[in-house]
Amino acid sequence: MGIDDIALSKQFKEVVSVELNNELNNISIFNFNQLQIDNIDRITISAEEYLKQSNDHFDLIYIDPDRRSEEKRQILLSEHQPNIVELLPQLLNISNKVAIKTSPLYDHNVALQELSNITDLIAISRFGEMKEMLILCSNNPSLVEPKITCVDIGEMIVLEEFTSQNNYSNAAETLE
């Protein structure tokens, strides 16, 4: 319904939002108009087609892939629509930073196997309930090992920070 676009519109001068579903775009545009938000350009096109047609460069790309097929929920990023694993090199060509919103069921070890250029993995919970994981990728990863951060937005606290090389059994206990 455009909620991520609205949040991003408060942090960036312009937001270009790509969505294949025309009905969702119309609902989002209606919401933006009702809220008098005018710095979001919502485009009805697939991510793959947009990348073929665009010469734009962005400060940040935020992608929330569709995790549902007609048969079942998809867990792996390579199964999402669009296929993030295939698109990541193209996305990093037009932006130095890519943020990927994933399912709370998505395992950080799988992320490290599926994707390159990961700088941060952020596990987001609300009052102890895991809501989603945000994966940050960069053209210039500054760390040898990605930093893993567990936050609780309900409590507004960082629960734990570590790298995948650290012993993180204490962090798992913190989240339980």
Image (cartoon, rainbow, N blue to C red):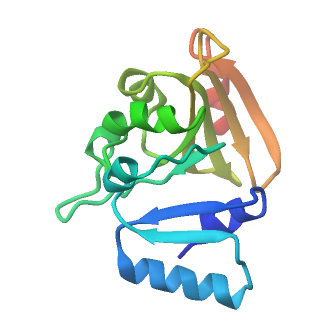
Q: Tell me which residue sits at (47%, 85%) in the image.
A: 26
Relative side of 118 to 155, left or right: left
Viewer-proximal residue, 108 or 127?
108
Position above or below: 55 against 138: below
Q: Tell me which residue sits at (51%, 22%) in the image.
A: 117
Position above or below: 35 against 137: below
Viewer-proximal residue, 54 or 150?
54
Relative side of 18 to 164, left or right: left
Q: Tell me which residue sits at (50%, 85%) in the image.
A: 27
Viewer-proximal residue, 46 or 68?
46
Residue 171 x, y percent position in the rendering: 66, 26
Q: Quadrant of the C terminus?
A: top right
Position above or below: 67 against 136: below
Residue 37 x, y percent position in the rendering: 72, 78
Q: In the picture, residue 161 is in which quadrant?
A: top right
Q: Tell me which residue sits at (69%, 61%) in the image.
A: 14
Position above or below: 17 against 111: below
Residue 99 x, y percent position in the rendering: 57, 42
Q: How many marks?
A: 0
- Residue farthest toward the left in the current orientation of the protein: 71
Q: In the picture, residue 84 is in which quadrant?
A: top left
Relative side of 131 to 153, left or right: left
Residue 49 x, y percent position in the rendering: 32, 55
